[in-house]
Amino acid sequence: MFSSIFCLIPGVFLVPYFIILFLCGIPILYMELAVGQFTRRGPIGVLSKLCPFFKGAGISSVIISFFMSTYYNVLIAYSLYYFSTSFRSQLPWQHCGNRWNTQHCWVPPTLTGEDLGAVSLLQNLSKPVPSKTPSEEFYNHKVLQISSGIDQMGDFRWELVACSFVSWILVYFALWKSVRSSGRVLYFTATIPFLLIFVFLCFSLTLDGSEIGLRYFFLPNFELLSDHKVWVNAGAQIFNSIGIAYGAVITFSSYNKYNNQIIVDTMVVSIINTITSVLIGVFIFITIGNITYEHETSIENVILDGPGLIFVVYPQALAKLPFPNFWAVLFFFSLLCLALNSQFALVEVVVTSIQDGFPRWIKRYLVCHEIVVLVVCIVSFFFGLPYVTQGGIYFFQLIDHYTASTAVMYVAFFEVVAVAWIYGSDKLARNVHHMTGKFPSLYFRFCWSIAAPLLILVRYWLQFSITFIRRFV
């Protein structure tokens, strides 16, 4: 999913990433594909049928998907804003001569160029301390017009409100004919971004300071393994990018043919997701290394959390490409495609679960699927309005942390317990054999029953212990 590129941590991050991937990510993905395909239901219906006592885990995944969809739409709004801005004659994050720039904005003199003309005269020729890139100031002072804190929500950013409204219109018309229409859209929206990844990666290798970013990304600092945040972010990276525990995998697999080979889907999704995450990580840290080199600072001072990682680092790299407007249009269009892919899945979970849970009420009052989708989109739009205020980014980061990084892991734990322990991993294995003619390997059954729940439990025990010690000792 789109948010997977928000939490990449270099070096030692790859160690917990692959541990959690093999012991949790791949096995739980296989399990969700299996139960969705076997029961032909959404997340609530699956747990109601297999283990009614844990039906709450299915409801929780739907609630999380709803809240995720409200703030995912903000990312689509940001992408639309940058996409429309990219059509200007000169990208506004190329230089420091804009009215929103401060005295801290700085571009190395070698990057100003004669083509910027009189604009370059407005830039600082000597590097201020601290220095900021034009893309960072554009994001903070123009796009967000960020306030001082979450207690100062400020006014609505009406440009972002308009972009959010347009994005919900796009989502509605992609989903109004159920998964059949969204599937056709996904063929288009999922292909273009991967073509651009390789183009940007090849260009980034030519940037000054690229070796700094590569060294920071690939050379592990094993002392960081004791930091629980590394494990938390690794888990969030995997669960968000693969989409497990949100109900999306279960929902879409319920449309599969009964004899569909689950192992093939599992391996294809896992391999593509891992390669994509690593390639994006390489590009991000090469660009961060370039910014570190130019501003003579440390990588830790350049790394940003949340959407700032995308809407600051990437525009900074795009500004250095030949014909930057052309590449910016392509990039933000592909970013828009990626965000829409994730949004389709999240909204489909909510819509499908409502229809499964209240079929008679839906048939009586909302009549058809198109009206259900319309109601969900309208309600979600209004729930997402706090994100597009001047203090909305703080609210965004709060919801992102407690849904994408925390709550979803609890849902995954109870989901695994319900299916593997209560319903039974052996019984699930027989169901898979009945569908595909093959039993799941011992590796999957071991991970379902022991490795996955134990790893999630240890992760939260460490997080709770460290938090308790820091607060009370």
Image (cartoon, rainbow, N blue to C red):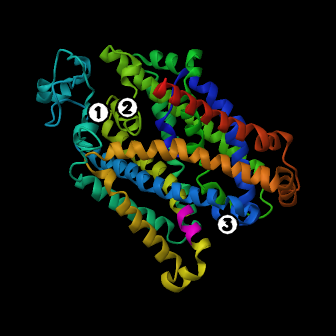
Q: Amino acid at mark 1?
A: Ser
Give the mark nearest the N terminus, 2 or 3.
3
Which contiguous range is marked in magenta? 349-354
As drawn, 337 above or below 209: below
Asked if 405 appears above or below 214 in the picture, the reply is below
On residue 135, the disc is: 1
Disc count in the image? 3
Q: Check disc 2: other Cα within 10 Å, few if <14, some if 14-19, many if 20+.
A: many
| SS at badge 1 | helix
Mark 3 residue crowding within 10 angstroms, few (<14) / some (14–19) / many (20+): many
- Circles 1, 3 touching at the beta carbon (< 8 Å): no
Q: Which residue is mark 2?
A: 313
Query: Residue 66: image x %, image y %?
Result: 49, 59
Which of labels 1 and 3 is toward the front?
3
Taking the magenta stretch, the answer to whether it contains residue 444 is no
**Along the horizontal axis of the image, is 441 left or right of 106?**
right
Along the horizontal axis of the image, is 340 left or right of 416?
left
Report the amino acid beneath label 2: Val
Q: Quadrant of residue 446?
A: top right
Label 1: few (<14), some (14–19) or many (≥20) C-alpha neighbours in 10 Å: many
Determine which of the numbered discs, if any, sits on residue 45 in the image.
3
Would residue 57 appear left or right of 309 to someone viewing this image? right
Percent x, y for residue 471?
46, 28
Q: Quadrant of residue 279?
A: top right
